[in-house]
Image: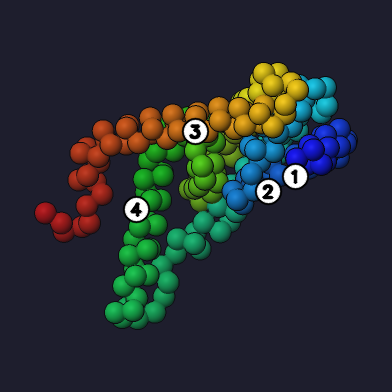
Amino acid sequence: MDSVLDLLHQTMSSPWVYLALFAIAVVDGFFPAVPSETAVITAGVFAATGQPDLPLVIVVAGCGALVGDHISYAIGRHAGGRLLATVPGRDTASDAPHRRRRGRRRAALEWARRAIAVRGGLLLIVARYIPGGRTAVTLTMGATRFSRRRFLAFDALAAASWGVYSALVGYLGGLAFERDPVRGLLLGLGIALTVTLVVETVRWVRGRGRVPADAPVSRPAGAR
């Protein structure tokens, strides 16, 4: 454990840590398996000891998230149509699963268009705290041709709030356990997990309450 802590201290005291945080936040924008939030929280924990610099961690994380989101938006804008396009060819029994998947994608796209048109900015900000939600929303916004200018404005707010939130969660954990960064990291991750669970619970409750109203819209054509 001591060797791991020594390695972390050396990593966090290196000026290269800022480049690493930026790169992780960028890649997480279109490849959500990369744990950018964990990396920023970890940097925040060690920032409580003086290295790395907390304001710089916030700026680097926010800028990386902004760039990553725009890459995801560009992927959706240029490839979204092809991903949702109907596959040509004769319809056979083996095509049924593909037809169902295409139908679900078209239904999801229609829902996304309506949701983004009504609350696009809020959707983008809230989705950042939902596992996988960030990438799904940015891709959809690109695929549905959401205004670039509005996307930049809303995403700048989302990225800045995420950078501040993630770094400060780690920093508070580091202050609480200044002599034990492992406990500080666990506290920071626990706070982040709690916030995610609260957001998911609220989203589930609100979605459950809307089911009866939305049910007729989601029925297939010709259904009674």
How dense is the environment of label 3, judged by Cα within 10 Å: few (below 14), some, or many (20 and up)?
some
The residue tagged 3 is 196
> How far from the left and from the top, in percent, is residue 198?
44, 29
Q: Earlier in the sequence, mark 3 or mark 2?
A: 2
Furthest residue to the left? 224
The residue tagged 2 is 27
Instruction: Tell me the amino acid under the disc marked 1.
Output: Ala
* Helix, strand or loop at mark 4: helix
* Helix, strand or loop at mark 3: helix
**Marks 3 and 2 in Cβ contact (< 8 Å):** no
Above or below — where is 73 with respect to 97?
A: above
**Marks 1 and 2 in Cβ contact (< 8 Å):** yes
Instruction: Give the quarter of the image for residue 173.
Output: top right
Q: Is residue 110 visible?
A: yes
The residue tagged 1 is 23
Of the two numbered discs 2 and 4 in the rendering, the one whose residue sits closer to the viewer: 2
Of the two numbered discs 1 and 3 in the rendering, the one whose residue sits closer to the viewer: 3
Q: Earlier in the sequence, mark 1 or mark 3?
A: 1
How dense is the environment of label 2, judged by Cα within 10 Å: few (below 14), some, or many (20 and up)?
many
**Marks 1 and 3 in Cβ contact (< 8 Å):** no
Query: Disc 2 to disc 4, how far (Cα)?
Result: 28 Å
With 73 as the anchor, is 17 left or right in this view?
right
Query: Disc 4 to disc 3, how far (Cα)?
Result: 26 Å
How dense is the environment of label 4, judged by Cα within 10 Å: few (below 14), some, or many (20 and up)?
some
